[in-house]
Amino acid sequence: MSPLFACFPVCLTFVALGLIGVVMLAFGLGNRIPGDDEPPAATADAKPHPPPPLWVFPVTLLILVLVMLVLAWYWPE
């Protein structure tokens, strides 16, 4: 059995966990603590942070795809 084939189930597990994490971050589902949605105490200079630009998510996915293609080329079965 090749080392890559032996690593396949473990790698798929971590890839699946990573995809779940990306979906959670993309939809803002992380850090759900009761009372966390309440606004903090008002201060004079506090400004809400804007969400990241819309290009961040597709660029992240493109980088991930490119890394996977490079790995597939570098370490074929």
Image: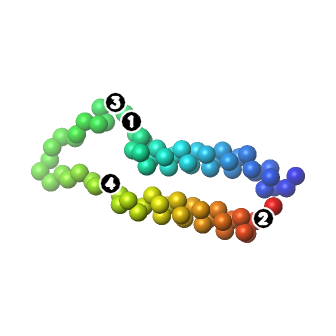
Q: Are marks 4 and 3 in contact (CB under 8 Å)?
A: no
Q: Which residue is mark 1?
A: 32
Mark 4 / mark 2, whichever is N-terminal: 4
Foreground: 44 or 70? Answer: 70
- Residue 51: image tag: 4
Closer to the eye: label 2 or 3 = 2
User: Sequence-wise, which precedes: disc 1 or disc 2?
Assistant: 1
* Amino acid tagged 4: Pro
Mark 4 → mark 3, Cα distance in angstroms: 22 Å
Q: Secondary structure at mark 3?
A: loop
Q: Residue furthest top?
A: 34
Q: Residue 62, position in %: x, y?
A: 53, 64
Q: Which residue is mark 2?
A: 76
Task: Kindly report the distance in space between the C-alpha atoms of the residues bearing marks 2 and 3.
Answer: 47 Å
If you read the primary sequence from the N terminus, does the residue marked by circle 2 or circle 3 appear first? 3
Name the residue carrying label 3.
Answer: 34
Between label 1 and label 2, give the one nearer the viewer.
2
* Local SS, label 1: loop
Residue at 61% from the left image edge and 65% from the top image edge: 67
SS at mark 2?
loop
Does 17 sit left or right of 48 as displayed? right
Q: Amino acid at mark 2?
A: Pro
Instruction: Estimate the x, y position of residue 48 in percent, counting from the top left.
Output: 23, 51
